[in-house]
Image (tube, rainbow, N blue to C red):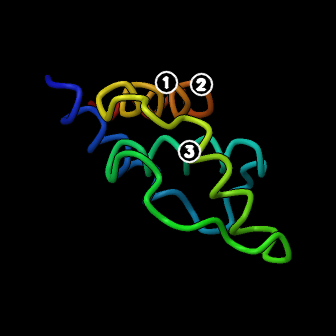
Amino acid sequence: MSVSDIFERCVTFVNALPKNEVISVENKLLLYKYFKQATVGNCNIPAPSIFNFQERKKYEAWKSIENLSQDEAKKKYVETVSDLYPEWKMDM
């Protein structure tokens, strides 16, 4: 199975989590930055205002991994989900 196939299955698992699932802000930012880098590539949006705290944190997280390849970002996303939810691989 390719990295892209595993990534897509992993994304499907995360999207199927209950909306009331408790995930720390730190882990949400990890998932966000790896997902964006994997699907879009380098950060391509202007920096939000410092007064828009949530969007600014997301921007900074994504920007922090600039130049990480999309395949590496997919691997990091899968690793992060595997650390948080080891059982997700049971669906494979």
Q: Which mark identifies residue 57? A: none
The reply to whether discs 1 and 2 touch (Cβ–Cβ < 8 Å) is yes
The reply to whether discs 2 and 3 touch (Cβ–Cβ < 8 Å) is no
Locate residue 8 relative to residue 35 in the image: left or right.
Answer: left
Distance from the alpha carbon under mark 3 to that under mark 1: 10 Å
> Could you say whether the residue bearing mark 2 is in a helix, strand or loop?
helix
Q: Report the residue at 41% width, 46% height from top.
A: 42
Answer few, some or many: residues within 10 Å of disc 2's Cα (few below 14, many 20 plus, some between 14 and 19). few
Q: Report the residue at 77% width, 51% height from top.
A: 25
Dot 1 amino acid type: Glu
Residue 20 on image: x %, y %: 68, 66
Q: Quadrant of the N terminus?
A: top left
Answer few, some or many: residues within 10 Å of disc 3's Cα (few below 14, many 20 plus, some between 14 and 19). many
Q: Report the residue at 74% width, 55% height from top.
A: 22
Distance from the alpha carbon under mark 1 to that under mark 2: 6 Å
Locate residue 70 relative to residue 3 in the image: left or right.
Answer: right
Residue to which mark 1 is pinned: 79
First in sequence: mark 2 vs mark 3: 3
> Could you say whether the residue bearing mark 1 is in a helix, strand or loop?
helix
Q: Which mark identifies residue 83? A: 2
Q: Quadrant of the C terminus?
A: top left
Residue 64 on image: x %, y %: 62, 38
Dot 2 amino acid type: Asp
Dot 3 amino acid type: Leu
Distance from the alpha carbon under mark 2 to that under mark 3: 11 Å
> Could you say whether the residue bearing mark 3 is in a helix, strand or loop?
helix
Residue to which mark 3 is pinned: 31
